[in-house]
Image (tube, grey):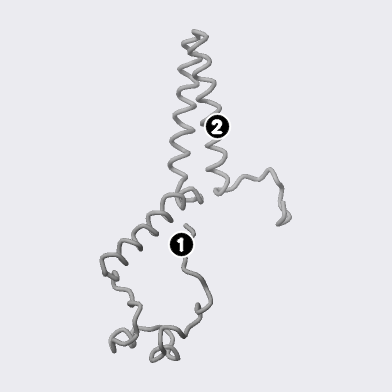
Amino acid sequence: AAEGSSPLRLMRADLFIISLVLSATFGLLWAWLQAAGSTGWAMLFLFFYLIATIVLFAGIPWSKFSHMFFKPAAAFGKRVNLANGTADNLPTLTRDDPEQQKRHSMELLQGAPMSMGLGIKREAPRHY
């Protein structure tokens, strides 16, 4: 609606939340119909529930839902790499090694001490 288009327009970004709502709704209706003893309707809503759930998980790459799993895994991987001393082909925290100085992206900071740089006043990124 903010872009001037209809608020009822559906896009790929809406797929996750719509399939989440439909999956929950069809799951509840399926359970209620099973409890009521309506086998035919229960099977139909089981089919709808399965389709909505498949669409829910198939649409994960186009949603922000995957960040819930990726970001903590990346943060954990970073801490493991720092603890065991590997850098995964990334520059290390010291610039005294000539090979690491050559790899630095900013020519200005290639020979600079570690206390000099763009993130000097920034706190460590541990808010995952």
Q: Where residue 96 sits: x, y (%)?
A: 31, 87
Q: Is residue 127 above or below residue 8?
A: below
Residue displayed at 50% across by 11% down: 35
Using the image as rendered, state which of residue 78 and residue 24 is in the foreground. Answer: 78
Q: Residues within 10 Å of mark 1 (few under 14, many from 20)?
A: few
Residue type indicated by callout 1? Arg
Q: Position of residue 37 (x, y in %)?
A: 49, 7
**In this figure, which residue is indicated by the disc labeled 1?**
126
Residue 66, horizontal then vertical, whole percent: 45, 50
Give, as a three-letter code, the residue at label 2.
Answer: Leu
Horizontal relation, residue 50 to residue 4: left or right: left
> Label 2 neighbourhood size at 10 Å, few (<14), some (14-19), many (20+)?
some
* Residue tagged 2: 22
How many badges with numbers are in the image?
Answer: 2
Asked which quadrant contains residue 25, the reply is top right
At 45% from the left edge and 83% from the top edge, which residue is drawn?
115
SS state under label 1: loop
The one of 86 and 10 positioned closer to us in this rendering: 86
Seen at 50% across and 70% down, the residue is: 123
Where in the figure is residue 17, as x and y percent of width and height? 56, 41
Instruction: Please state which of the two labelled residues, at mark 1 or mark 2, is closer to the viewer.
Output: 1
Q: Earlier in the sequence, mark 1 or mark 2?
A: 2
Tell me: residue 58, above or below residue 95: above
Q: Which mark is residue 113?
A: none
Q: Is residue 42 above or below residue 101?
A: above
Q: Is residue 105 above or below residue 16?
A: below
Q: Are marks 1 and 2 in contact (CB under 8 Å)?
A: no
How far is mark 1 from mark 2, CA to CA? 36 Å
Badge 2 element: helix
Q: Toward the viewer: 89 or 48?
A: 89
